């Protein structure tokens, strides 16, 4: 960081880092490039990443440069910036030299005006990034064209593609002669384990929803065993554990382990024993147990050294051996087999290729696995009797997770296109395969792993790193006009403690507002303490029948606790708080009281103490390609009260509740009916009326919203003026039909504006805020439509622009056009 940003950082702390205001492919690409340049590994050497890039180029599915510069939902999603960025940076370094990396960081890091990405490129290379990107793509077309020609010259394997969803597939295996089981996350549905019936035209059935990637295995009686993320010890840990499901019975998962961090289960052919991998302190080892009592009978089979890993064990058909993939120090990812009787280990492979996914043939004479020894992952077979290794597939893309059929005549595997992973089927015969080429090690010498030195460990003390990280200056709008503020925040290295402080001064009236907040996350539940001093105008001061200006000075503090109770597919949260607020008046009435008018009404002042409790439940989800949440529900309730028994001068009670439900329509994906019902009721001994208000969206300035990163919500009674309907009770029902219009996913080059998706909403609102008993005849109705466009500013910041028309059908309503930044409920 240099120039003006460096000067500002000297004064206020590190508040200005220009290099963070670049497209993510630059930030992450540089990091990933250096990851490979400084080690013997890294994603530049990953054959999986190379496959992603190769197939995108060969299938003409390369991202447009403007899309790469911004947030996008294209496959491979979050890996895009690492994938494209590292390879583009590597190409630039080869063309212009290693010093370009440092020059880019120094040039952009000293600029006060952000987003001059192409200007930087032009200054340092003589060409814009747009021009260089096109040249890089052309170079890759030539490079990967040669790779494809080389594979085709050796004869390409032709297999049948039997799924077409792309995205992520894991854990493929045959459930029986005709059915395949596997985990899939396709971006349109819940992550789930599916079964594909080959005898019914590749008909697919969802078996069970899963949290995290799952590797299913089957008991001889048909029960399904798999791993899934779930909570352990409330919200402290979230681990993989083993579950069982009877696919033929009612949907009910049985949890078999608790906090075991167990993955990749496999069951012996006699159904009595299970093997799996356990993660302990970032080290994965191989375990075995009786299926009747996993936690009570488990024992370790293969103990890994610190930070070494074991993956995907498979029993041999006779149950005498277990094959598995293991990562060992030095960059070795090999296939190994352990004899359960002698505990002797056979090293099937021992090289720096990625050898993964072992699976035995039904008669145990072959062990299939995937290896990238040629630079492209293919399926191989090891013959224990002769120790020979044969190459089964020869592909331009890649092949993973071999799954031989129970009769041994077919081999399913996970293949790849530029849209992601799918399942392929290959017919086997005695002539399938050819001698495997030897592995050629063209990697640098292995990097030396840092030794773990226990003596350097000591008890953690958060206070050592808990201090202000920066000072910020802001200019915000308040009820009087503008307010100048100075703030700071900080947290310790482990993020167990956090604090925030702000002091603001009204430029119009000179009032000083203060906010202090501290949060402790060291134990469940989370605990926070806050203090505020706020001066604000308010209503309720009436003299001679006329409303008078009134300014309230409030000092308050609150102690709050909050506890999350997560589970695999839903969560609950309970919160409670105790608050004290003391208020006084800063206003006076200078006129003369009229004896013919009612007595003045003066807002109550003094000490108010309240207790609040709330609960929320959530199982709503928004899949990767969804425009809005499409399934599930969210519901919650809150209650707060004040009473002299808890230290208050006043009495009050307030309750509120809501429920949201999302239902995707069966006739089209991403067409969703969304329903929200909310209500509330309250009373206050201070005589203040109108605890709740309804109406449409308030008038807002789009510029102010952009500057403050502010977006409105979607709870409103549209077609009526904002806050125009008041009462001590309210009910509001909102029904919306949401449907996609288009996915744009384009922008003007490196200009930091990117248009994402556009969708429409047709709505009907029904509700009222009222005093006294409920009367449905007074409820008001509003209807209309909205168009919402998602877009990105500054390469990273998402916004949603809402353009709407509403018509209030009852008293106080009418035609209403509105434009704001906001999202649906």
Image (cartoon, grey):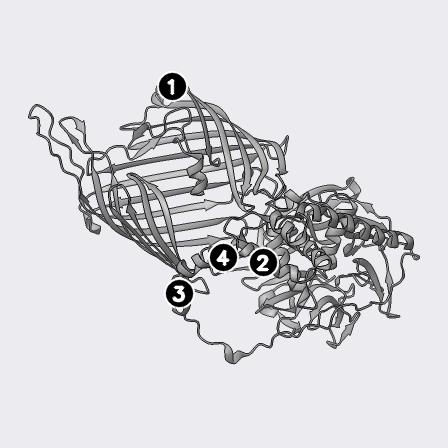
Q: CA distance from mark 1 to mark 2?
A: 61 Å
Q: CA distance from mark 3 to mark 4?
A: 29 Å
263, above or below 478, in the image = below
Would residue 806 be found to the left or right of residue 759 on screen?
left
The residue under the point 49% across, 57% down is 3
Q: CA distance from mark 2 to mark 4?
A: 13 Å
Residue 3: mark: 4
Q: Nearer the viewer, mark 2 or mark 3?
A: 2
State the residue position of label 1. Answer: 810
State the residue position of label 2. Answer: 105
Q: Nearer the viewer, mark 1 or mark 2?
A: 2
Q: Is residue 710 visible?
A: yes
Q: Is residue 243 visible?
A: no
Cβ atoms at labels 2 and 4 below 8 Å apart: no
Q: Nearer the viewer, mark 3 or mark 1?
A: 3
817, above or below 664, in the image = above
The residue under the point 17% across, 39% down is 587
> Badge 4, how many Cα within 10 Å: few under 14, some, many 20+?
few
Sequence-earlier tag: 1 or 4? 4
Sequence-earlier tag: 3 or 1? 3
The residue under the point 44% across, 26% down is 765
State the residue position of label 3. Answer: 466
Viewer-nearest residue: 6 or 668: 6
Furthest residue in direction right, as rendered: 431
The residue under the point 54% across, 62% down is 258
The secondary element bearing badge 1 is classed as loop
The secondary element bearing badge 2 is classed as helix
Viewer-nearest residue: 646 or 29: 29
Furthest residue in direction left, as rendered: 595
Would residue 560 be found to the left or right of residue 294 on screen?
left
Would residue 583 be found to the left or right of residue 401 on screen?
left
């Amino acid at each position: 960081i240099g120039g003006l940003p460096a000067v500002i950082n000297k004064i206020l702390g590190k508040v200005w880092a220009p290099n963070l205001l670049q497209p993510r492919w630059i930030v992450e690409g540089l990091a990933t490039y250096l990851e490979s340049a400084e080690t013997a590994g890294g994603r530049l050497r990953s054959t999986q990443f190379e496959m992603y890039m190769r197939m995108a180029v060969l299938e003409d599915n390369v991202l447009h440069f403007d899309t790469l510069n911004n947030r996008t939902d294209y496959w491979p999603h979050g890996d895009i910036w690492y994938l494209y960025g590292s390879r583009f940076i590597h190409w630039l370094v080869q063309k212009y030299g290693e010093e370009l990396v440092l020059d880019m960081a120094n040039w952009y890091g000293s600029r006060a005006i952000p987003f001059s990405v192409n200007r930087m490129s032009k200054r340092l290379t003589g060409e814009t990034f747009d021009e260089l990107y096109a040249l890089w793509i052309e170079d890759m077309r030539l490079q990967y064209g040669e790779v494809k020609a080389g594979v085709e010259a050796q004869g390409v394997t032709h297999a049948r593609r039997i799924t077409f969803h792309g995205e992520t597939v894991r854990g493929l295996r045959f459930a029986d002669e005709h059915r395949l089981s596997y985990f899939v996350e396709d971006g349109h549905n819940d992550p789930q384990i599916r079964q594909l019936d080959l005898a019914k035209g590749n008909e697919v059935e969802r078996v069970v929803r899963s949290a995290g990637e799952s590797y299913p295995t089957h008991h001889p009686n048909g029960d399904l065993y798999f791993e899934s993320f779930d909570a352990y010890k409330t919200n402290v840990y979230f681990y993989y554990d083993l579950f069982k499901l009877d696919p033929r019975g009612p949907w009910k998962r049985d949890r078999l382990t608790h906090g075991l961090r167990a993955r990749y289960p496999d069951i012996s052919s006699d159904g009595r024993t299970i093997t799996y991998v356990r993660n302990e302190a970032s080290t994965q080892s191989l375990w075995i147990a009786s299926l009747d009592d996993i936690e009570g009978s488990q024992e370790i089979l293969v103990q890994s050294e610190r930070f070494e890993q074991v993956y995907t064990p498979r029993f041999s058909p006779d149950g005498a051996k277990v094959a598995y993939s293991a990562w060992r120090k030095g960059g070795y990812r090999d296939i190994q087999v352990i004899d359960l009787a002698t505990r002797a280990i056979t090293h099937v492979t021992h090289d720096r290729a990625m050898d993964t996914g072992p699976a035995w043939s039904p008669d145990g004479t072959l062990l299939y696995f995937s290896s990238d020894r040629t630079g492209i992952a293919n399926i191989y077979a090891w013959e224990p009797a002769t120790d020979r290794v044969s190459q089964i597939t020869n592909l331009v893309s890649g092949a993973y997770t071999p799954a031989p059929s129970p009769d041994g005549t077919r081999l399913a595997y996970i293949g790849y296109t530029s849209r992601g992973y799918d399942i392929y089927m290959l017919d086997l015969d005695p002539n399938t395969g050819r001698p495997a080429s030897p592995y050629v090690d063209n990697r640098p010498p292995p990097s030396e792993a840092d030794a773990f030195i226990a003596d350097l460990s000591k008890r953690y003390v958060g206070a050592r790193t808990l201090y202000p990280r920066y000072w910020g200056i802001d200019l915000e709008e308040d009820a009087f006009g503008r307010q100048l503020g100075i703030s700071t925040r900080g947290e310790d290295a482990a993020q167990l403690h956090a604090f925030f402080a702000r002091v603001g001064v009204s430029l119009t009236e000179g009032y000083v507002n203060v906010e202090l907040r501290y949060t402790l996350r060291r134990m469940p539940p989370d605990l926070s303490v806050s203090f505020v001093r706020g001066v604000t105008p308010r209503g309720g001061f009436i003299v001679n029948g006329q409303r008078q200006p009134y300014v309230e000075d409030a000092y308050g503090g609150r102690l709050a606790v909050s506890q999350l109770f997560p589970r695999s597919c839903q969560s609950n949260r309970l919160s409670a708080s105790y608050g004290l607020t003391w208020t006084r008046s800063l206003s006076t009435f200078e006129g003369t009281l009229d004896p013919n008018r009612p007595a003045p009404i003066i807002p109550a002042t003094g000490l108010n103490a309240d207790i609040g409790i709330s609960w929320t439940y959530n199982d709503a989800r928004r899949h990767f390609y969804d425009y809005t949440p499409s399934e599930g529900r969210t519901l919650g309730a809150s209650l707060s009260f004040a009473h002299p028994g808890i230290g208050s001068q006043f009495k009050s009670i307030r309750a509120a509740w809501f429920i949201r439900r999302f239902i995707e329509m069966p006739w089209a994906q991403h067409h969703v009916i969304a329903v929200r019902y909310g209500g509330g009721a309250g009373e206050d001994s201070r005589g203040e009326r109108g605890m709740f208000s309804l109406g449409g969206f308030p008038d807002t300035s789009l510029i102010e919203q952009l500057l403050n990163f502010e977006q409105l919500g979607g709870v409103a009674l549209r077609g009526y003026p904002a806050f125009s309907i008041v009462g001590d009770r309210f009910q509001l029902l909102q029904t919306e039909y949401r449907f996609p219009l288009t996915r744009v996913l384009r922008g003007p080059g490196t200009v930091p504006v990117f248009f994402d998706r556009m969708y429409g909403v047709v709505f009907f609102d029904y509700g009222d805020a009222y005093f006294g008993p409920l009367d449905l005849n007074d409820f008001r109705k509003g209807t209309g439509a909205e168009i919402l466009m998602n877009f990105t500013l500054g390469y990273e910041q998402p916004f949603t622009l809402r353009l709407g028309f509403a018509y209030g059908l009852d008293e106080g309503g009418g035609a209403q056009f509105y434009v704001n930044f906001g999202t649906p409920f």
